[in-house]
Image: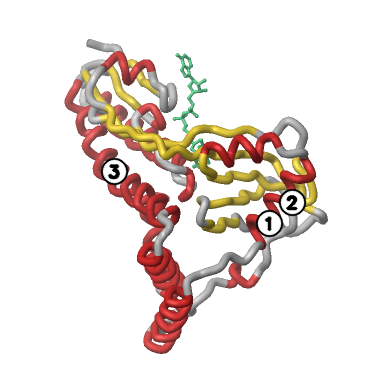
């Protein structure tokens, strides 16, 4: 066989259905509300902001000095409500989500604070990055027609490769956007597949042969699955509504904030 079909057709992939195999998947009953937002004044807009709320994370991703892209995870019914708000009320709701202080259980506040102090006293690392001194810009308006909502879910194909066919990107795996890793995973698939196909072509192996495709599948599943399950766990942790989960959230953030090299590790792993 000298033919290779590459399934790059997204989470609802027809190619994945055609090649068969199990697809492990679940819905979060959450939607990702997206919009293009404009600030009240131009600013050096180079920082991506994300706030974890009891209802799910809200993130601003820079587009230019005056605009950012919104990704706001909300339970399905709340997502539909915010889509129907007037533009003015929508902007108020976004600013509220970023600025409003939420009531926290005292045990969580105390434990997080004392853990932070302990870590700061014993670790030689800084407890915050320069970026964290900055305040996120206030949103002034939403671009007309830019609001939309997409269902969020988890999905993973048991096979990325079959004889003459291979899956890449969301066709093979789908994750919650809270870590902003969906596109990176897909880029990683493309890089890995291109390298493996180039090597096998140099060795005279016909395109579409199973062995190099299985090498691709093994390498990418080893990389993708742990990250995907970690992101799924984070979503569950941050949206669980009880003191134990709130404590774990506080401790997790404090630890990752304090251990700067650990943060570097997470960032490097996600980018590899
Ligand atoms: C609300 C939301 C926010 C997100 N935010 C982020 C983020 O901040 N950072 C990040 O990295 N990722 C994010 N993601 C994930 C990211 O969007 C996906 O991981 C990425 O788009 C996957 O790219 P892909 O090319 O594999 O699939 P897709 O982007 O789904 O592209 C598949 C393409 O195939 C086409 N197609 C499908 N079927 C057929 C067919 N039968 N014939 C021809 N064409 C077909 C589709 O029209 C589409 O153009 C987010 C996702 C959502 C839902």
Q: Within 10 Å of the Cα at label 1, are there few (<14), some (14-19), or many (20+) other Cα atoms? A: few
Question: How many numbered tags mark residues here?
Answer: 3
Contact (CB < 8 A) between labels 1 and 3? no
Task: Give whichever of discs 1 and 3 has the lower sequence position.
Answer: 1
The residue lying furthest to the left in this view is 211
Judging depth in this view, the residue of 200 and 57 nearest the camera is 57
What residue would you read off at disc 1? 96
Q: Residue at x 41, y 31 (%)?
A: 170
Q: Residue at x 41, y 50 (%)?
A: 235
Q: Within 10 Å of the Cα at label 2, are there few (<14), some (14-19), or many (20+) other Cα atoms? A: some
Q: Taking the image as drawn, is residue 206 in sight? A: no
Closer to us: mark 1 or mark 3?
Answer: 1
Whether residue 45 is situated above or below residue 131 in the rendered picture: above
Gap in Å between the C-alphas at discs 1 and 3?
35 Å
Q: Residue at x 43, y 84 (%)?
A: 114
Whether residue 159 is situated above or below residue 222 in the rendered picture: above
Horizontal placement of 99 versus 242: left or right? right
Q: Where residue 17 appears, x then y in whole percent?
A: 31, 17
Where disc 3 sits, the SS reads helix
Q: Where residue 32 appears, x then y in whole percent?
A: 54, 39
Contact (CB < 8 A) between labels 1 and 2? yes
Where disc 2 sits, the SS reads helix
Where disc 1 sits, the SS reads helix
Q: Where residue 249 appears, x then y in whole percent?
A: 41, 64
Judging depth in this view, the residue of 33 and 44 nearest the camera is 33
Task: Give whichever of discs 3 and 2 has the lower sequence position.
Answer: 2
Some atom of ligand 1 lies within 8 Å of the CB belonging to the residue at label 3: no
Judging depth in this view, the residue of 199 and 167 nearest the camera is 167
What residue would you read off at disc 3? 225
What residue would you read off at disc 2? 92
């Amino acid at each position: 066989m000298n033919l290779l079909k590459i399934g790059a057709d997204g989470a609802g992939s027809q190619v994945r259905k055609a090649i068969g195999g199990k697809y492990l998947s679940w819905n979060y009953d959450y939607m990702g509300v997206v919009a293009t937002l404009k600030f009240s004044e131009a600013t050096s807009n180079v920082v991506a902001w994300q706030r974890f709320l009891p209802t799910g994370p809200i993130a601003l991703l820079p587009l230019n000095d005056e605009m950012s892209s919104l990704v706001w995870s909300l339970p399905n019914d709340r997502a539909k409500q915010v889509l129907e708000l007037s533009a003015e009320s929508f902007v108020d709701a976004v600013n509220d989500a970023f600025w409003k202080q939420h009531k926290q259980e005292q045990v969580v506040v105390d434990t997080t604070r004392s853990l932070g102090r302990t870590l700061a006293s014993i670790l030689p690392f800084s407890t915050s990055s320069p970026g964290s001194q900055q305040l996120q810009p206030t949103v002034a308006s939403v671009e007309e027609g830019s609001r939309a909502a997409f269902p969020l879910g988890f999905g993973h194909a048991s096979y990325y490769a079959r004889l003459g066919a291979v899956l890449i990107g969301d066709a093979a795996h789908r994750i919650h956007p809270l870590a902003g890793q969906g596109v990176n995973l897909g880029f990683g698939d493309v890089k890995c597949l291109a390298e493996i196909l180039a090597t096998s072509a140099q060795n005279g192996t016909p395109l579409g042969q199973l062995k190099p495709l299985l090498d691709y599948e093994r390498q990418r599943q080893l990389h993708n699955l742990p990250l995907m399950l970690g992101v799924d766990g984070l979503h569950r942790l941050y949206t669980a509504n009880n003191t134990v989960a709130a404590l774990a959230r506080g401790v997790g953030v404090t630890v990752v904030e304090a251990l700067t090299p650990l943060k570097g590790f997470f960032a490097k792993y996600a980018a590899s």
